[in-house]
Structures are given as structure tokens and as C-alpha cells.
Image (tube, rainbow, N blue to C red):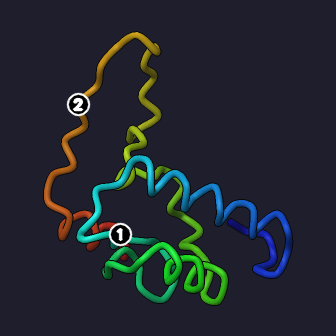
Amino acid sequence: MKASHISDDYGNGVEQFLQFIEMHAPSLRGKYFYPCVKCANGRHQSLNEIRSHLICHGIIPTYTKWIWYGELPNNASVSHTESVEVDRGCRIEDMIRDLG
């Protein structure tokens, strides 16, 4: 997240994030929330638009747990055999917390 936006490491990280979104995040007609610095998880876009935003504007540096995309919050450890239901709560409240 802290690498230069034109570096291979950053580009590879963006691609990994997009794959993660596609596999885990709920979509709205093929569009997803995304944590670019400009939009801060406040808009839905296609994966191609998300890629452009993340490369041009960067990703929110503090957004290290992708709880809107299926990753567990609070460093919870879960064995691979357990089934876990994550309560995503109100997304508007989450957006406000992310902005704060």
C-alpha cells in the first residue's frame, strides 16, 4: 500500500486486491466498493474503474483489514475447518469509521 503507484509491487498488489474483491465481495450489478484515497469506500465501480482509481489515487493506507471483502476483523484466528459468519453491520457506519 505504501509502494510507489508506478512500481511493479504496487501494481501486483492492486491485481491481488481485485482478485480478492471478485472472489469475496458482494457486488451491485458487477460493481464493488473500493478503498481508494479519493472515494474512501463510498462508491461502487467496475473492477477496471477500481484498478484505475487505485493506481491514480492510491489506496487508503490504514485500510489493512479488508472487512468489507470477507476478511475477518480484529485479527481473529479461525481454523480452516470452522465455518464463520461475519456480520458486516451497517455499511454507512463502516464508511464513516473508515473516514475518521
Q: Quadrant of the N terminus?
A: bottom right
Residue beneath the point at 53% across and 79% down:
48
Q: Label 1 sits on what residue type? A: Tyr
Distance between mark 1 and mark 2 Cα atoms: 20 Å
Q: Image quadrant of residue 72?
A: top left
> In the rendered view of the protein, which quadrant contains the C terminus?
bottom left
Q: Is residue 69 left or right of residue 84?
A: right
Classify mark 1: helix, strand or loop: strand
**How many labels sit on residues?**
2
Residue occupying the far top of the picture: 81
According to the picture, the residue beneath numbered tag 2 turns out to be 85
- Nearest the eye: 5 or 12: 12
> What crowding class fits label 2: few (fewer than 14 Cα within 10 Å), some (14-19), or many (20 or more)?
few
Q: Which residue is at the front of the view, 35 or 61?
A: 35
The spot of residue 53 in percent (x, y) is 55, 85
Q: Position of residue 28 (x, y in %)?
A: 24, 69
**Quadrant in the picture for residue 57:** bottom right
Ranked by sequence position, the earlier of labels 1 and 2 is 1
Any mark on residue 24, and which? none
Q: Where residue 11 sits: x, y (%)?
A: 75, 69
- Quadrant position of residue 97: bottom left
User: Label 2's element?
Assistant: loop
Task: Report the disc number at residue 32.
Answer: 1
Is 63 left or right of 56, judged from the image as shown? left
Left or right of 26, for residue 2: right
Q: Is residue 94 above or below residue 44?
A: above
Q: Amino acid at mark 2?
A: Glu
The residue under the point 15% across, 52% down is 89
Q: Residue at x 39, y 52 (%)?
A: 69
Considering every residue shown, the one lying at the far left of the view is 90
